[in-house]
Amino acid sequence: MDWSKYSFVVRSKNRKLVLLHLDKPKTPAQIAGELKLSLPHVSRAIRELEREGLVECLTPNEKVGRIYKRTELGEEVVNALQE
């Protein structure tokens, strides 16, 4: 477990919510609607999580409607958050 990644996630309410909510592959718009957050907030959280290797884009060549999912490292952080 990379505790620096855990710390990175818990320092932001939106990063934590988005990572926990990616229980299956979803688009940013789906996440925003389900969490009642603005799309820009969700997009920023996803960008930050992706940069840290916690989520990955399954459709990187798409301009709109990209689908994201947790990486193995992201799953480890979620498991630690749920303990």
Image (tube, grey):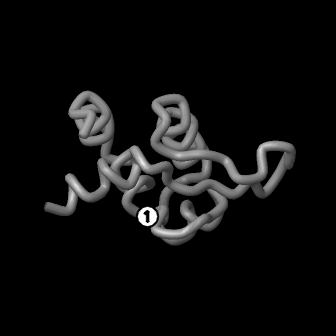
For the image, the number of numbered tags is 1
Q: Secondary structure at mark 1?
A: helix
Residue 82 placement, left or right of 70:
left
- Residue 57 is situated, as x and y percent measured from the top left of the image, at 67, 47
Query: Residue drawn 85% across and 49% down?
Result: 62
Q: Quadrant of residue 78?
A: bottom left
Q: Is residue 25 above or below residue 50?
A: below
The quarter in which the C terminus is drawn is bottom left
Q: Residues within 10 Å of mark 1 (few under 14, many from 20)?
A: some
Residue at figure coordinates x 37%, y 60% from the top left: 20
Percent from the top left, x then y, of residue 6?
26, 39
Q: For the view shown, which residue lies furthest in the left direction?
A: 83
- Tell me the quarter of the image containing the N terminus: top left
Is residue 48 shown left or right of residue 67? left
In the image, 16: left or right of 29? left
Identify the amino acid type marked 1: His
Residue closest to the eye, 31 or 9: 9
Q: Please say if 33 is above or below 63.
A: below
Specify whether 47 is left or right of 54: right
Q: Residue at x 54, y 49 (%)?
A: 42
Q: Position of residue 38 (x, y in %)?
A: 55, 53
The residue where tag 1 is placed is 21
Residue 4's place in the image compared with 81, above or below, is: above
Q: Residue at x 49, y 49 (%)?
A: 71
Whole-percent x, y for residue 50 in the image: 54, 37
